[in-house]
Image (tube, grey):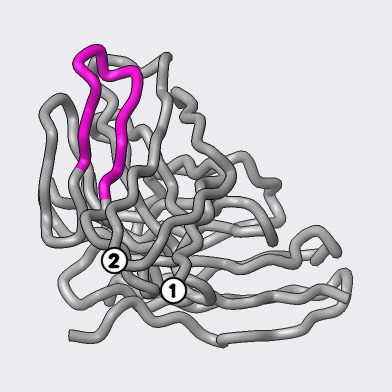
Amino acid sequence: DAKTTQPNSMESNEEEPVHLPCNHSTISGTDYIHWYRQLPSQGPEYVIHGLTSNVNNRMASLAIAEDRKSSTLILHRATLRDAAVYYCILRNFGNEKLTFGTGTRLTIIP
Amino acid sequence: DAGVTQSPTHLIKTRGQHVTLRCSPISGHKSVSWYQQVLGQGPQFIFQYYEKEERGRGNFPDRFSARQFPNYSSELNVNALLLGDSALYLCASSPPGTRSLYEQYFGPGTRLTVT
C-alpha cells in the first residue's frame, strides 16, 4: 500500500478554518484518497474521499494537488466537536481494506 | 437506523485464554471488517468478510480467526492470548455496491485487556 505522511498534531482556534495536509508522493493512478477521523472513545468515521478533482460534502472539502502527490482536508469552520485524530488513507480501487497511519491529532482551542 | 454494534464493550482476560468478540453490522450491509487498534496507533486491518466468505486477511498470526453468519453478523476469535493482544478491536461494515469501496462504518469497539 502506498504511504501517506501527516503532521503528528495541529491546533486551531474555534470557528476558524482548518487545513490538514497529507503527502502521498508514491500514489498510483488507481489510488483513491480517503479521510477518516476518530473522535475520542469512538471508532473512526468516514469524512470524505476523492480521486483527482476537489470534493465537497457537508462535513469538509478535499483539495487534491494537480500531480496528486498531496492533498488537504479543509474544515471550513472548526467547532470543538471537530477535535479528533484525522487519518489520510490511500485505498486502491476495488480494495476495501483501509491502511491507517498514525494520523494528525487536531486540537481545537475555544 | 442503528449503527454497527459490538459486544462486549470491555473485557479483561488472562494470558493464554481465549476470547470471542461479536459484531452486528448495519442492516443491509453484507461486508464486515475487523481492525485492531493498539494505544497511540491507527487501526490495523485483521480480516474482511463478505457473504460469509473471507475476502482479506491482514498480517496477524493464526491465533486470530473470524467468521460471518447468515445474518451477516460476525465473530472475531483470538486464542492463546498474549499481553500484546491488549487493544481496541473495531468492527466495520460496508454498504452494498460501489459505496463499499469508499465508506466503512465503524462500531465503538471492544476494549480487550490481557493481564
Report the amino acid beneath label 2.
Glu
Position of residue A108 in the picture relative to residue B83 (left or right) = left
Same chain for mark 2 and mark 1? The answer is yes
Position of residue A67 in the picture relative to residue B68 (left or right) = left
Question: What x and y, as percent, mark residue A69?
Answer: 34, 18
Label number found at residue A15: 2
In magenta segment, residue A67: yes
Residue at 62% in and 40% down? B59
Label number found at residue A110: 1
Q: Nearer the viewer, residue B58 or A107?
A: A107
SS at badge 1: loop
Task: Say which chain tag 1 marks.
Answer: A
Question: What x and y, as percent, mark residue A25?
Answer: 41, 15
Question: What x and y, as percent, mark residue A24?
Answer: 41, 23
Report the amino acid beneath label 1.
Pro
- What residue span does the magenta drawing correspond to? A62-74
Position of residue B78 in the picture relative to residue A79 (left or right) = right
Q: Is residue A74 visible?
A: yes
Q: Nearer the viewer, residue A20 or B13?
A: A20
Q: Is residue A25 above or below residue A43?
A: above
Q: Nearer the viewer, residue B61 or A61?
A: A61
- Circle nearer the N terminus (2, 1): 2
Q: Is residue B67 visible?
A: no
Tags 2 and 1 in contact by the CB under 8 Å rule? no
SS at badge 2: loop
